[in-house]
Amino acid sequence: MIQKLVTTGGLLVIGAILMIATPARAQNAPAQGAPARGGRGAAPTPPCGPAVSGMKNVAKDSRCFELRTYTMRPDGAGNIDLLHKRFRDATSRLFMKHGMTIIGFWQPLSKPDTLIYLMAYKDNAARDAEWAAFNTDPEWVKARTEMNVGVAVENVFMNATDYSPMK
């Protein structure tokens, strides 16, 4: 069991017991022939949400939470303002179109080239299905192409604790 308190640019995440950082691809699109994994390449999403069992302090009715951090690559295309525009004008709407639950977006004050957001899913299988649908949506492909940004992506999967007010 891993218990961790994370502070990132003023964002405080409390009450997450299962936290698995996954390697991320630097591109927004999945690798050629790889399953669509929300920019993560072919690595499977770890069990999260109700699929997690036998862990002390983890809520049995927790959703699967994913904390995503996008950091602009110095040598990448675009800039942080273009990334915010893409989320504001296209990404958020398309997330909702594909059944994805947005908890919130944050701009770390100490890291102006970073965007952090938190998503919630029923479980890891729902997460993968929703991202697969999103990544192949023609509107998303068009928005990603027209508002191209080079970002490094880090994602952390979490389950709520049994005493967390948010599950």
Image (cartoon, helix red, strand yellow):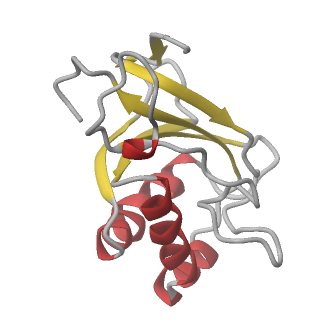
The x, y position of residue 104, in whole percent, is 30, 42
The x, y position of residue 67, in whole percent, is 47, 37
Q: Quadrant of the N terminus?
A: top right
Using residue 68 as the reference point, say whether residue 16 is left or right of it. Answer: left
The x, y position of residue 89, in whole percent, is 36, 68
Counting labels gives 0
Going 26% across and 21% down the picture, which residue do you hit?
162
Q: Is residue 116 above or below residue 56?
A: below
Q: Quadrant of residue 2?
A: top right
Q: Quadrant of residue 11?
A: top left
The answer to whether residue 118 is visible is no
Q: Is residue 74 above or below residue 112?
A: below
- Of all residues, the one furthest to the front in this rendering is 54
Going 30% across and 52% down the picture, which residue do you hit?
102
Q: Quadrant of residue 64?
A: top left
- Of all residues, the one furthest to the bottom in this rendering is 138
Going 65% across and 58% down the picture, which residue do you hit?
39
Q: Quadrant of the C terminus?
A: top left
Going 83% across and 76% down the picture, which residue do you hit?
32
Q: Nearer the viewer, residue 137 or 163?
A: 163
Using residue 79 as the reference point, say whether residue 129 is left or right of it. Answer: left
The answer to whether residue 67 is visible is yes
The x, y position of residue 40, in whole percent, is 69, 54
Q: Nearer the viewer, residue 157 or 138?
A: 157
